[in-house]
Amino acid sequence: MKILIVDDEAINRTLLTNMLYNAGYKQCVEAVNGIEALDKFTKEQPDLVLLDVVMPGLSGFDVAPKIRQLATG
């Protein structure tokens, strides 16, 4: 399972990546903002997205429907 972690705080991304790795999820991809999240979602096609809500630029509330639209075509 590939997981996309989206958060503007590096410590949160690192913490989540390490926790997931220790739980057996070895394929984690990180994005630092909403724009990068959309790009990585398209390129990496993750099975799950962990999305921060409060981010500069596009918030998680802005990104979620765009990811849903990309996922359904």
Image: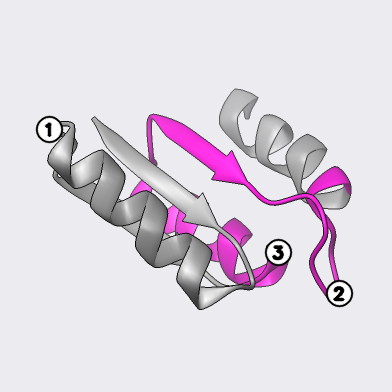
Which amino acid is tagged 1?
Gly
Residue in the image at 38% along x and 39% along y: 46
Is the C-beta separation of discs 3 and 2 under 8 Å? yes
Residue 59 falls inside the magenta stretch: yes
Residue in the image at 27% along x and 40% along y: 20
Query: Which quadrant is home to the N terminus?
Result: top left
In x, y percent, where is residue 56? 83, 75
Residue in the image at 54% along x and 41% along y: 50
Q: Which residues are magenta?
A: 33-61
In depth, the one of 46 and 15 nearer the eye is 15
Which amino acid is tagged 3?
Gly
Q: CA distance from mark 2 to mark 1?
A: 32 Å
- Name the element at disc 3: helix
Which residue corresponds to mark 1? 24
In depth, the one of 72 and 20 nearer the eye is 20
Q: Is residue 68 above or below residue 58?
A: above
Which residue corresponds to mark 2? 57
Left-right relation of 8 to 20: right
Q: Residues within 10 Å of mark 1 (few under 14, many from 20)?
A: few
Q: Residues within 10 Å of mark 3 (few under 14, many from 20)?
A: many
Answer with mark 1 or mark 3, whichever residue precedes in sequence: 1
Q: Is residue 36 above or below residue 54?
A: below
Answer with mark 3 or mark 2, whichever residue precedes in sequence: 3
Residue 19 in which image quadrant:
top left
Residue 30 in which image quadrant:
bottom left
Query: Which quadrant is home to the C terminus?
Result: top right
The nearer-to-camera label among 2 and 1 is 1
